[in-house]
Amino acid sequence: MLNNTPAVFAFEDAKRYQAMKNRLFLLNTSLNFLFLLVLVLTGLSRQIKEWLLFLSEDLLRISALYFSVFAVSAFLLSFPMEYYEGFVLEHRYGLSRQALGAWLKDVLKRSIIIFVVSLIMVEAVYFFLANFQDTWWLWASLFWFFVSVVFTRIFPKVILPLFFKPTPLGPGVLHDRIYALLSKLKIAVKDIYVLDFSKKTVKANAMVAGLGAGRRIYLSDTLVQGFPADEVEAVLAHELGHYVRRDTFKLVVAGLAGAFFSFYLSALALRRLIHFFGFSSISDIAGLPLLLAVFLLAGLILLPVQNGFSRFIEKQADIFALKTTGDNAAFISMIQRLGERNFSDFSPPKAVEFFLYDHPPISKRIKLAKNMQLKV
């Protein structure tokens, strides 16, 4: 029998938890930028490349070796903060059920995946830098788009099972309600799976993942076991709203626009700064920290724009769910219960919402449902 009892929710505790998460995000971003500046300004980045030249002079091999040293160093320096945020803080508020060993195993798997994907991107970017110096940013953006599509396609079958065990949803009331909803919306989904979230967390979630024939519905067991069937249906109707409205494609295209902006800004910066900081050319792998620093700044500039677009998409998915199910009361109770289980700040400060929230706050989602209920 699953122990699905969430941590005891209190609004003040949730506000403190989310405020700490926000401060850690800002601190982590600042430290990452400082780490990149130290590598550039002290000449350490150039020195690391000089050491590696004793092993090989091949451009792509040196790039791979340099990035490996860089990635391992960044991981070790950031691990104390990751441990505090991902393990200590989650246990302090009763949200995590993982032992330290299991948590470390997940961190290692996630880090390896990030390393492999990042290495592919770095190798591709420096190939473009070496061979297409005027248009490298355009090819890098398109390659990023290709990697994003591939990752989205393989995520359900390759990545997700590394962290959660998917089990087909068995027959019952929930199964019948979900398939009735799918039939109503004329959506063909191959499988519906339940993920064993309860082994790791009390939090709950649902998603429609994958592309084309690989598309699948996933429900956390904490959702299936801890929420009434009408509330699970409301969650799923929201996720199906993303599918019907082709929101995944919209977000990928928006991401491509963001990549164009970030890579183009990086191209302008490299052209003006690469020799100032003593790098031999824009394809000098020692300039990677400079490239990443510009990319980080570009990401911060884009963050409120991207989050604003995401909040708009999430609001439209809420409206779709409310219109599809016609059960505003179930939606309201679902959002309330989900916010409590996930320790959400129901009404964050407007500045925090503007910069950091990719979903509307819980209070606004409840207000939307109540207003639509009154109009009916």
Image (cartoon, helix red, strand yellow):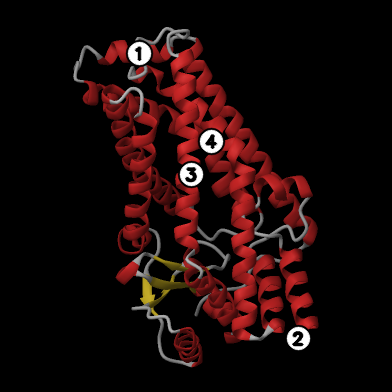
Circle nearer the N terminus (1, 2): 1
Circle nearer the N terminus (4, 2): 4
Eye-nearest disc, 4 or 2: 2
Q: Which mark is residue 42?
A: none
Location of residue 267 with respect to 154 vertically, above or below = above
Percent x, y of residue 199: 47, 65
Q: Are marks 4 and 1 in contact (CB under 8 Å)?
A: no
Q: Amino acid at mark 2?
A: Val
Comparing 114 with 291, the one in front is 291
Circle nearer the N terminus (3, 4): 4
Q: Is residue 9 visible?
A: no
Residue plotted at (38% across, 47% down): 145
Residue at label 1?
281
Secondary-structure class at tag 1: loop
Q: Amino acid at mark 3?
A: Ala
Eye-nearest disc, 4 or 1: 1
Report crowding for label 2: few under 14, some 14 to 19, many 20 or more residues within 10 A (C-alpha): few
**Distance from the alpha carbon under mark 3 to that under mark 1:** 27 Å
Query: Residue lying furthest front in this view?
Result: 134
Comparing 132 with 67, the one in front is 132
Percent x, y of residue 69: 34, 25
Secondary-structure class at tag 4: helix
Residue at label 4?
80
Location of residue 11 with respect to 300 vertically, above or below = below
Residue at label 3?
257
Is 17 left or right of 124, judged from the image as shown? right
